Amino acid sequence: MDLEFTVTETLTHDLGRINEINYDFEEITVENVSFGVTSKKERRIRTYTANIKREQYNNLVGRNPDALSFDDFTHVLRPFIMGFYDKHELEQAFNILDQDGSGFIHIDELSNFLTIINQYISSDKLINYIRKVDINSDGTLTFDEFRSLILKGVGRDIVCEHL
């Protein structure tokens, strides 16, 4: 099975700050399918769109004291969706999510971010995703485990409701 994807990022600025983010994600899977002695390539295409405006985000988080600011949210969302990162971008995202400064990202810290864009993700499903990269099985993410979550596309799967 071959997997290809493209992501288009569009940021709308006003007075030097981001007011809207839009990600268009296209995933193409090509798989050889056998029918007895014959086989053919089957191609499946899925598309996902994430579009969030600052005002909309602020209304969603309401009075949640643990919610990230819109600016922090956009810094964290980018590597999740893109599946890669610039030099210090991942460190910044990790530090934003590690709200208690423990050096680990706990499930509830990750949940505060993810439930904004995937309201259907349950704690159980989130834990199952985390298990894919949680090397020491402690239910938290170290920086290296977080990097693995991003590079393996697990974060994007969660964001895109690829459940």
Image (tube, helix red, strand yellow):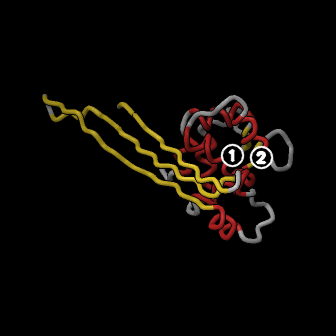
Mark 2 residue type: Ile
Query: Which element type, helix, strand or loop, lies under badge 2?
Result: helix
Q: Position of residue 68 (x, y in %)?
A: 74, 56
Q: Position of residue 83 (x, y in %)?
A: 56, 37
Q: Earlier in the sequence, mark 1 or mark 2?
A: 1
Label 1 to label 2, Cα distance in Å?
A: 8 Å
Q: Which residue, as the protein is rendered here, is positioned at the far left?
A: 37
Q: Nearer the viewer's eye, disc 1 or disc 2?
A: 1
* Discs 1, 2 touching: Cβ within 8 Å: yes
Q: If the image is split into quadrants, where does the N terminus sit?
A: top left
Residue highlighted by disc 1: 75
Vertical relation: 34 (above or below) 62: above
Q: Quadrant of residue 28?
A: top left
Q: Depth check: give the residue in front, 163 or 22.
A: 22
Q: Which residue, as the protein is rendered here, is positioned at the far front?
A: 15
Q: Position of residue 11 (x, y in %)?
A: 58, 50
Question: Does 55 sit left or right of 39 as displayed?
Answer: right
Image mark for residue 85: none
Crowding near the residue tagged with mark 2, few <14, some 14–19, many ≥20 C-alpha atoms within 10 Å: many
Residue highlighted by disc 2: 96
